[in-house]
Amino acid sequence: MSPDGEGAPRRQVHTAALLIVAGVLVLFVPAGDEGRVLVPISEGHGLSAVDGIGAGLLALGGTWLEVLVVRRLPYLALPPRALFALGLLAGLGVGLLVASVFAGFFWWWAVGAATLGIALLVLVPLTARR
């Protein structure tokens, strides 16, 4: 971000989004091609080296994007109710994603990804504006 607080440049938002897309694509590698499970998480879920790389890219890009959005929030001029709703939607999405891994809510990951995606589809374009 620029030192005068003008906002997040589009280049940073695009770079963070590319890291997220790269991480998701790496996570889409079929389980048979990933190698052995290094860290078992729950029945049917485990972390291989390929998953670790994908999760690392996803975490790096997601954290960078989150920092850009949070630093830009005062400039977005969203009403408090909209901010609350977007925060609730994003939190519910992340919660469902985590719960689907640890608690056997297998198809709930899709609902969690969709709710988190909706919140991101609203906030990211606003953040990328100058």
Image: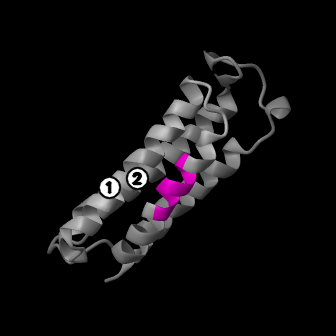
**Vertical position of residue 20 compared to residue 73: above or below:** above
Residue drawn at point x = 56 percent, y = 61 percent: 18
Task: Decide which of 11, 129 is in the foreground and name it.
Answer: 129
Tell me the SS state at disc 2: helix
Q: Quadrant of the N terminus?
A: bottom left
| Residue denoted by label 2 | 90
Classify residue 99 as left or right of residue 104. left
Mark 1 Cα-neighbour bin, 10 Å: few <14, some 14–19, many ≥20:
some
On residue 48, which mark appears? Answer: none
Tell me the SS state at disc 1: helix
Residue drawn at point x = 56 percent, y = 24 percent: 103
On residue 87, which mark appears? Answer: 1
Residue 40 % position (x, y): 63, 16
Residue 55 % position (x, y): 56, 39
- State the extent of the magenta-drawn residues as a range: 112-118
Residue 58 % position (x, y): 53, 47
Classify residue 103 as left or right of residue 33. left
Classify residue 114 as left or right of residue 2. right
Residue 114 painted magenta: yes
